[in-house]
Image: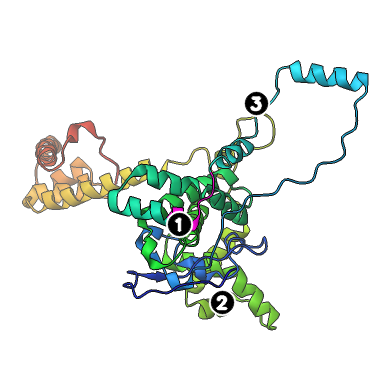
Amino acid sequence: MANGRKRTNSPAPKARAKRPAAPARPKAPLEEAGGEAEEGEALASDPDTLEPDLAELDEVEAEIEEPAPLAPVRTPTKAEAAALVRAQNAPALTNRDPLQAYMAEVTRHPLLTREEEHRLAKEYQSTGDVRAAYRLVASNLRLVVKLAHEYHRNPLSLLDLVQEGNIGLMQAVKKYDPDRGVKLSSYAAWWIRAYILRYIMDNWKMVKLGTTEAQRKLFFKLRQEQEKLVSQGFEASPRLLAERLNVTEQDVVEMDQRLGHDELSIDAPLGNDEDSRTTRADRYLPSNAVPADERLGSEQLKALFRENLAAFAQTLEGKERYIFENRLTADEPLTLQDIGDKYGVSRERARQIEAALINRMREFMRERIPDFDMVAVPKG
């Protein structure tokens, strides 16, 4: 990298954050995308809320790849020439590689000199001319492809990384100040990496990673810290890792499991048979299990009935209260004859009191519970 950095007395940015480094080795997801994980940690959640430290930006140039030297050309035989003609006239089996098509389009835009870049940046800053912004963006598209290659690991698509990096490049052009002594390519590299890193964190797994500060820290540093402890002769236990990274042991265990295992869909069919409709859910979940939403609704309905029954009981006295507690809501209800014997009335009279009590209770529930007649009263 060149060392010709300039510092100015311009006001400091609102927030300071280091540049995320280029990937070094294919280990953990973002360890692949940064040798020093702490440099990318601050960018993982929302790069739009940060601003790069201009004094720490390295100079980055968009490069033009030199074509490889061509092998000596051999004159084809008549049979080879005929086969080549037939192949050229035959319909294509596959479309053109989209990455090659994109690179062919990118190389159409020439690089800008430092003077042209400064003039266009000043023009866009003062007038907001989108044509000037277009030239600034187009001249640095090669830089996006170069940086996207540094972070490219399966299962992520290179073109997806390029697309996210292009968004970061446009954001850089929007915020670039040509009077601060930093080249646009160096300033834009920070934003390009920031958007690529955020995309990697959001899409590395089906279940999103890095939703909390502790998870983002572990996503960047866990594998690196484990290797450091092992190299020092320590056992990389969750407790020691939690102390070193200032997180909880539970966070360490969960992130280690999520980084070390792939997700499995319980709705995916088992086996390779296309006609098979058996899923993991069919195997691991009982087929007669009540769905969770129905079970929760039933429990809430029972709680609502119990609450209103208790309120209704407070309005009762004498024989009605006794019938309600010892027959209507009791686990072992008394018979009508038992109630008649207690109060010296006939069995029929006890039944009439019970029927009137049930009607009163129904009206009470209609007033307290919306759509009471549309729901079934749960037992118990």
Dot 1 lies on which element? helix
- Mark nearer the N terminus (2 vs 1): 1
Residue 240 seen: yes
In screen coordinates, is 362 left or right of 111? left
Distance from label 3 to label 2 (Cα)?
47 Å
Residue linked to disc 2: 241
Which region of the structure is painted magenta? 110-117
Q: Are the residues tagged 1 and 3 within 8 Å (C-beta)?
A: no
Q: Nearer the viewer, residue 3 or 265?
A: 3
Quadrant where the N terminus sits is bottom right
Distance from label 2 to label 1 (Cα)?
51 Å
- Mark nearer the N terminus (1 vs 3): 1
Q: Are the residues tagged 3 and 2 within 8 Å (C-beta)?
A: no
- On whether residue 115 falls in the magenta region, the answer is yes
Dot 3 lies on which element? loop
Residue linked to disc 1: 115
Front disc: 2 or 1:
1
Task: Give residue 373's position: percent from left, percent from top.
Answer: 19, 32
